[in-house]
Image (cartoon, coloured by chain):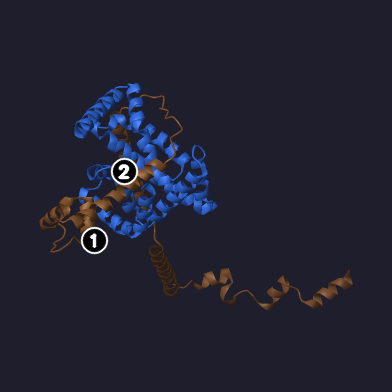
Chain colours: A blue, B brown
Amino acid sequence: MKTVDNKDMSLKIVTLVENARNGNRLSFHELVSLFQEDIYRLAYFRTFSQMDAEDLTQDVFEQAYRKLATLNEPRRFRALLYSIAVNRCNDLLRKRKYTALLHRRNTEEQDFSTSDKNMNSCYGDRIDKKTFWKQVKLMLGKLSTMEREVFTLRFMDHRNINEIASILGKNESTVKTHLYRALNKIRAHAEFFKEHRELIS
Amino acid sequence: MKYQTTGHLRDEQIIWAVIDKQELSGEARQHLQVCEACNIKVEQFSGDLQDFGREARQAVPPFSGTVKLPAAKPSMGSHYGGWLPFFGAVAMAGLLMFFYFMGMQTVTPIQYTMLQQQENLLEDEALMREISEMVEYPLSDDIYRITGENGAGYDDDFLDFIVPGMQDDSQSELFI
């Protein structure tokens, strides 16, 4: 049933992409509404800032709109979108590193405060989320750039190995090797998962 | 087929099982099918990762903005993409030619020193040639007499006439 749904979805995406390429803005708007949340989340998992993630989402769709004409296979639209998003996030993180060197601003504090501004949640929940993201940052910080990328795409963005290979422009074996290394390091954080399991239960 | 196994799956095999079961050796795969303990380990690690992902997605603050599209229609990359690389290649070739020819006319410090040494040598040679010519063909006595060289014509009377002595000066003052 799920496969049939996926197939229908793929067909819908292909049709929308083809229409958008012919200048149908409504079709592209529909594509935006389909992928907006995914791209925003992808950006948030990398920047940990709501403001940056929203700006990046806007940039990604603008760039995708411009690149639509050069896309030979409409079924690769999702990969194109993710690929743009990953690259834009990396650009921003690189820029942020240089800026941090110059200004030495405490991005962590600022980012978490801005990300909480629109949350209609209680104080305790906010603290939980803050602690959660701090732990995530700590955990991801132990990984190399490629390991982090592959891990995030696989378990946070829920992409399969084939899609990750397509997004990053690597072969599947390379992706699996990076994922293995990442998981090997992540296993050391067993307590983190245990705590979460308890929290969820 | 990453690892061979005899008993329960090792930690690295558990990880490979989470990534892709097809990466395990046939023996390990068979073991995984029958061994409950190993299966639980794989499922637990896989479940932890899935839960973590779910939790992460739920912890993301909601998207509050709206995506605005640029006014222009998607540009047809074929025209743009065809000419731009061509012009780029031509400009690059021009630059390369320019730097190549500039490079040919540029003299390195070592080359410059060598050239200077050669010039000095040539200058020395020219001087030596002039000296040897003067030795071989000295000026005739008549010319010496005209020019006054060799002391001819510069006697004491002539010099007194040119530069009068102190005694003469005091006498001239008395006359005044």
Q: Compared to A20, does A84 lie above or below?
A: below
Determine which quarter of the picture holds residue A186: bottom left
Q: Residues within 10 Å of mark 2 (few under 14, many from 20)?
A: few
Residue drawn at the location 39% of the way across and 45% of the way down: A45
Residue B49 in the image: x percent, y percent?
A: 31, 49
- Secondary structure beneath disc 1? helix
Q: Amino acid at mark 1?
A: Asp
| Callout count | 2
Residue drawn at the location 17% of the way across and 51% of the way down: B21
Residue A30 seen: yes
Which is more toward the observer, B97 or A103? A103
Q: Quadrant of the C terminus of chain B?
A: bottom right
Residue A172 in the image: x percent, y percent?
A: 21, 48
Which is more toward the observer, A56 or B21? B21
Q: Amino acid at mark 2?
A: Ala
**Which chain does the residue under circle 1 lie in?**
B
**Mark toward the start of the polypeptide (1 vs 2):** 1
| Residue that mark 1 sits on | B11
Q: Quadrant of the N terminus of chain B?
A: bottom left
How far is the residue under mark 1 from the one under mark 2?
56 Å
Asked whether, in this view, residue B11 is left or right of residue B60, the answer is left
Identify the disc placed on residue B93: 2
Determine which quarter of the picture holds residue A5: top left
Residue A73 seen: no
Residue B141 in the image: x percent, y percent?
A: 51, 73
Asked whether, in this view, residue B65 is left or right of residue A87, the answer is right
